[in-house]
Amino acid sequence: MTARSVRGVAATAMAGVLAAGAAACSAPGGSGAEGPKDSLVVGLANEPETLSPLLGYGKDGNSKIFDGLLRRDAQMKLRPALADALPKVSDDGRTYTFKLRHGVKFSDGKPFSAKDVVFTYRTLLDEKTNNAAKGELDAVEKVTAESDDTVVFALKYPYAPFAERTVLPIVPEHAAKGQDVNTGSFNTAPIGTGPYVLTGWSKGEKLTFKANPGYWGGEPEVKKLTMAIIKDDDVRATRLRSGDLDGAILPPNLARGFKGDKDKVTITAKTTDFRGVTLPTANKVTGDIAVRRALDLAVDRKAMVDKLLEGAGRAGHGPVPTDSEWFAKGTERPHDLDKAEKLLDDAGWKPGDGGIREKDGQRASFTLWFPAGDKLREEHALAFASDAKKAGIEAKVQSGTWEVIEPRMKEDAVLAGGGNPADPDFDLYNLLHSSLALDGFNNMAAYGNPDVDKALEEGRRSGDKAARKAAYDKVQRGLADNPGYTFLTHVDHLYVMTDRWKDLSAQVEPHDHGLGAGPWWNVEDWQPKK
């Protein structure tokens, strides 16, 4: 999992603090498909740890409660939000000037201004703020308010994707200032300029929202929004079938069960969301480069796409999808079990008891964790273990909560996920840079490669796209040569929805498929069918 992926999992919620089964199975308390036509109840696998953007919530947009200076449209193009236009950028690429939209108010009625933007970015970057994603704003040297409606960012270096970072939600200074940023009440009782207002949060069960009547974009037609937290895929499907939910994210095998339901529609979102296995550097087996290379060759990615995803995805030959303009051609990993076995033979890993290889008394065996209730990760873990065993490597599959898994990541492998379509820096730096090894959920494998570190820094600091492409090609080639992760697939997200609203769509989605992603990415614009 990338920094984003799993602190995406931790910060925006992709995998931390999951509810206990009993709580997840309780009714969301809102009306589902049988309820009022202006309400929406959807089932999610995960919930946020916080609702404060200062700690990472909503950093990639679509937070519902908040707005950023910019937003992304259906084609992932940047559009103005709290800014009234795209920024003016200096010739040297180091100064971004934003003019702000007039007349915007926070949900408590207080006016929005440039001081709120300055407060948000300065607080986020403060060393005392516990935001694992603050490194994503490393380029920011200074942010100032030239006037009530003008904000200027000065960068240390010409960071090409900086504008993509300004989808970050803006926090009201008057509401968040003066309290502990890490533990204060704002984290669970937020105030924003967004289309919805939080009305309740039952941890492990649901979050409820109401339409913001003063929203600058117009009050949404969906007046009540409930996000039910249901970590178990089977339970989510059952509750959708019973009418308790209006929509849910489901793995392919469960989504297929709704194909004959004339009242349901399935929406497929293309993603950059990968599934892969971390190969901890500190583990004597997974830290061996011959084992890493052999696993890369032993896994049958095509079979995983065909059988596990039922075609709803692509083979994963690295963190960057093969259809991305940033993919380094030539880094595809073939399925070649014979070559995998020869690599292990040549490196001294010889077949032992039960066909599992050994070297210098060390058995080629390690533990592989996946988060309990995630059927798709479980299936990937089991398929990986089956393929690895054919090469003589034992992966002992176990499940647990992230609280159980995280302390074990230094030695044990994890079936991880990650991906962000906005820019390669957003994934690769946090996934691979040695300075972030085991920093929360960043660089979960403790991968360390000086050449990759250097290329990551070149890609981050260059303002020239061709130079950046060359840098990220180096990163991907370095990762192919010394795989710190065995990448398996890129997963399409499948959503099954009650067919009650017009023109539902999906963006190209990141790994995070929680509050901000899904067909409800633009729920504030939905119109009911007549």
Image (cartoon, helix red, strand yellow):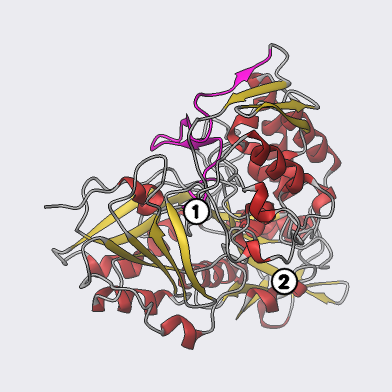
Q: Is residue 358 left or right of residue 212?
A: right
Callout 1, which amino acid? Ile
The magenta region covers 61-90
Apparent side of residue 300 relative to residue 140 in the rendered image (left or right):
left
| Quarter of the rendering occupied by the N terminus | bottom right
| Residue at far left of view | 530
Callout 1 crowding tier (Cα within 10 Å): few <14, some 14–19, many ≥20: many
Which of the two discs, 2 and 1, sits closer to the camera?
1
Would you say 23 lies left or right of 237 here?
right
Residue 468 lies within the magenta run: no
Residue 57 appears in which quarter of the rendering? Answer: bottom right
Q: As drawn, is 47 to the left or to the right of 365?
A: left
The answer to whether residue 76 is above or below residue 93 is below
Q: Which residue is drawn at 66% across and 23% down?
A: 96
Q: Nearer the viewer, residue 515 or 431?
A: 515
Q: In which quarter of the image is residue 241?
A: bottom left
Is residue 339 something one can see in this rendering?
Answer: no
Q: Label 2 amino acid? A: Glu
- Can you tell which mark lies on residue 406? 2
- Residue placed under numbered mark 1 in the picture: 65
Marks 2 and 1 sit apart, C-alpha to C-alpha, by 29 Å
- Asked if 10 appears above or below 154 in the picture, the reply is below
- Was residue 88 drawn as part of the magenta stretch in this picture? yes
The numbered mark, 2 or 1, whose residue comes first in the sequence reads 1
- Residue 161's spot in the image, x, y percent? 63, 30
Does 30 sit above or below residue 453? Answer: below
